[in-house]
Image (tube, rainbow, N blue to C red):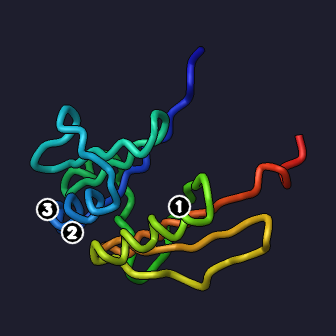
Amino acid sequence: MYQQMIFVNLATNDLDAAKKFFAGLGWEINTQFSDDSTASFPVSDTIIVMVHTPQKYREFTKKEIADSTKTSEVLIALSAESREKVDELVEKAVAAGGSVSGETQDHGFMYGRAFDDLDGHTFEVAWMDPAAVQG
């Protein structure tokens, strides 16, 4: 069965630093789809983070590239399998040079935190108790 994929394309001002940052999250670079202008990081079987130099990113859009340290162009939300995994990923991001973004959200059945990468892109990480999800 076909599974739709999501490719999150982000511009970075320092590709080498971005590679180290995302590797610090435990995401392995896919060298088949990486070169001197792009780094590909599979997050799961269906989510790929693609980090591009501004020159490469401009090949995909005619729009001005947002300064993600000053404006929010997108919020990237990732699920986690537990509250502990939420904390683990945010702690890895901070250790890799990122920063905590916003306050911890704890609603009992749902728990979330967020971090900004080196270029200011915000990643939200959330866990939701499966028993709380209505089918």
* Label 3 vs 1, first from the N-terminus: 3
Label 2 and label 1: CA atoms lie apart by: 29 Å
Residue 24 figure quarter = bottom left
Callout 1 environment at 10 Å: few (<14), some (14 to 19), or many (20+)? some
Q: What residue type is labelled 2?
A: Asn
Q: Say left or right for 106 vs 66.
A: right
Residue 29 visible: yes
CB contact under 8 Å: marks 3 and 1: no
Q: Say left or right for 9 vs 83.
A: left
- Circle nearer the viewer, 2 or 1: 1
Q: Which label number is shown at residue 85?
A: 1
Label 3 and label 1: CA atoms lie apart by: 26 Å
Please provide percent x and percent y for residue 135: 88, 40
Q: Which label number is shown at residue 16?
A: 3
Q: Which label number is shown at residue 13?
A: 2
Please provide percent x and percent y for residue 101: 50, 81
Q: What residue type is labelled 3?
A: Asp
Work out whether 4 lies above or below 66. Answer: above
